[in-house]
């Protein structure tokens, strides 16, 4: 019992050794299997920027409201979703509170799913 290890310097030294061995292993694997540089760029076609899949619903929502109504798709609907998410704890209480909160979350989730998958199915992403 007299040979107890203390955190400093005994265990700390072991943690540092394990940390540096893992970093060395990751570095070795990165050198052994290098990452490809990415997708190939075709300079003959015009550049058509599109967002990643998790922002695709917001990008396509703007396209459904052209011209002067773009403010609705770009600001009001996303802001309404944020306000609903913020206010869920307040209307969660009371009679049918859990059902109202579940319906609000289901509505936002389904809107996200529909506006994400719809452009992918139509092929206009």
Image: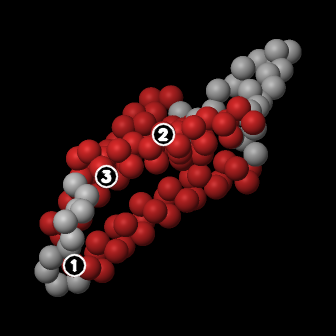
Comes first in the chain, label 1 or label 3: 3
The answer to whether residue 56 is above or below residue 104 is: above
Q: Which residue is mark 3?
A: 11
Q: Secondary structure at mark 3?
A: helix
Residue 50 in percent (x, y) is at 63, 32
Residue 53 in percent (x, y) is at 59, 45
Rendering quarter of residue 93:
bottom left
Q: Nearer the viewer, residue 121 or 72?
A: 121
Q: Residue furthest top?
A: 43
Residue 68 in percent (x, y) is at 44, 29
Circle on res. 20? 2
Q: Secondary structure at mark 2?
A: helix
Identify the residue at horizontal 22%, vertical 54% (top origin).
6
Q: Secondary structure at mark 1?
A: helix
Identify the residue at horizontal 28%, vertical 75% (top origin).
100
**How far apart are the alpha carbons under marks 1 and 2?**
52 Å
Q: Nearer the viewer, residue 84 or 20?
A: 20
């Amino acid at each position: 019992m007299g040979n107890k290890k203390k955190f400093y310097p005994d265990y700390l030294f072991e943690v540092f050794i394990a940390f540096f061995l893992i970093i060395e292993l990751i570095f070795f694997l990165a050198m052994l299997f290098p990452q490809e540089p990415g997708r190939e760029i075709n300079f003959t076609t015009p550049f058509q920027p599109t967002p990643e899949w998790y922002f695709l619903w917001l990008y396509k929502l703007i396209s459904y409201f052209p011209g002067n109504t773009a403010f609705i798709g770009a600001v009001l609907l996303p802001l309404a979703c944020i306000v609903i998410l913020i206010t869920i704890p307040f209307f969660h209480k009371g009679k049918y509170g859990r059902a109202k909160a579940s319906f609000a979350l289901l509505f936002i989730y389904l809107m996200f799913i529909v506006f994400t998958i719809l452009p992918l199915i139509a092929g206009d992403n």
